[in-house]
């Protein structure tokens, strides 16, 4: 089973509309022939419409970074799936560790968000990953099991293979400290095995990404791991040269 790698740049809370348009204008010509990978950018809400419009007809997919599970209602400050699909957003990142740690996002609410996004036609990147303490205490697998099982619980088995799961060890995010190839492969394979517990066929299809200080100098090793189907890239995705170098490092 060959899975097309996905290289997704998570811009986080970086970029006015003007800056975002400039960044994609530099990026688009550089990825026009990168047919060995799918490429996405995860853009702040205010710049989504502009980035969608300036990337129409290109290979670049545009993702939001969060979403509420209800289609509408009294949820001040939130954005819903129909609001994203109305402007042709392609997908959404759910459960990023910054959402979990700083904004109280729980596995319980992700259980509602993931199917709500999929029902609306959005591609989901569900983020999971352990803290440094959890790793040191030997709790990595228990944490991942909980996050993957709860997050995907309400996804019907026939649609499970469409989900993208990003394994992002929290201690590696934005720290410059990357998981070793062995640590990453073990966790990526474990995530796939958790999907296989529900459906072996879905596990063959599901794309599992690595995230956490992926940079041009470590990308080739990580992206070549047997269970690595791409990367979720934060800091390095803000620099077009670095992001393109990571895309070029994906196996062909
Ligand atoms: P980083 O962020 O590449 O800056 O570590 C990754 C992420 O948070 O998705």
Image (cartoon, grey):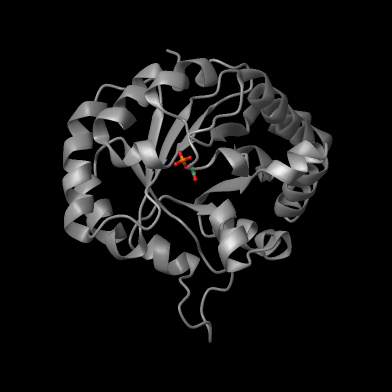
Nearest to the observer: residue 164 or residue 56: 164
Q: Residue furthest top?
A: 252
Residue at screen point 58% across, 24% down: 228
Nearest to the observer: residue 206 or residue 101: 101
Q: Is residue 29 left or right of residue 189?
A: left
Q: How many marks?
A: 0
Percent x, y for residue 118?
57, 54
The reply to whether residue 168 is in sight is no
Q: Is residue 116 left or right of residue 217?
A: right
Residue at screen point 36% across, 36% down: 236
Q: Quadrant of residue 31?
A: top left
Nearest to the observer: residue 223 or residue 98: 98
Question: Is 180 situated above or below 213?
Answer: above
Percent x, y for residue 19?
19, 53
Residue at screen point 25% across, 38% down: 58
Percent x, y for residue 59?
30, 35
Q: Is residue 101 left or right of residue 20?
A: right
Q: Residue furthest bottom?
A: 74
Q: Is residue 181 left or right of residue 66?
A: right
Residue at screen point 64% across, 57% down: 115
Q: Quadrant of residue 238?
A: top left
The reply to whether residue 80 is in sight is yes
Image quadrant in which the C terminus is located = top left
Question: Is 248 situated above or below 131?
Answer: above
Percent x, y for residue 113?
61, 62
Image quadrant in which the N terminus is located = top right
Question: Is 220 situated above or below 81?
Answer: above
């Amino acid at each position: 089973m060959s899975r097309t790698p996905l290289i997704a740049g998570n811009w986080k809370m970086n970029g006015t509309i003007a800056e975002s348009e400039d960044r994609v204008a530099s990026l688009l010509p550089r990825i026009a022939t990168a047919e060995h990978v799918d490429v996405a950018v995860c853009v702040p809400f205010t710049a989504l419409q502009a980035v969608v419009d300036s990337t129409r007809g290109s290979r670049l997919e545009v993702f939001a970074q969060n979403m509420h599970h209800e289609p509408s209602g009294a949820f001040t400050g939130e954005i819903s799936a129909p609001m994203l699909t109305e402007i042709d957003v392609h997908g959404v990142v759910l459960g990023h560790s910054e959402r979990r740690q700083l904004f109280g996002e729980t596995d319980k609410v992700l259980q509602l968000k993931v199917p709500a996004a999929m029902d609306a036609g959005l591609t989901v990147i569900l983020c999971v990953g352990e803290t440094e303490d959890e790793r040191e205490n030997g709790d990595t697998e228990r944490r991942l099991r909980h996050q993957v099982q709860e997050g995907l619980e309400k996804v019907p088995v026939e649609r499970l293979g469409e989900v993208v799961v990003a394994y992002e060890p929290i201690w590696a995010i934005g720290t410059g400290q990357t998981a070793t190839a062995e640590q990453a492969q073990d966790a990526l394979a474990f995530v796939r095995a958790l999907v296989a517990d529900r459906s072996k066929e879905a596990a063959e299809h599901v794309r599992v990404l690595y995230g956490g200080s992926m940079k041009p100098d470590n990308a080739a090793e990580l992206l070549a791991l047997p269970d690595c189907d791409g990367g979720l890239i934060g800091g390095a995705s803000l620099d077009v040269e670095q992001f393109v170098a990571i895309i070029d490092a994906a196996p062909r």
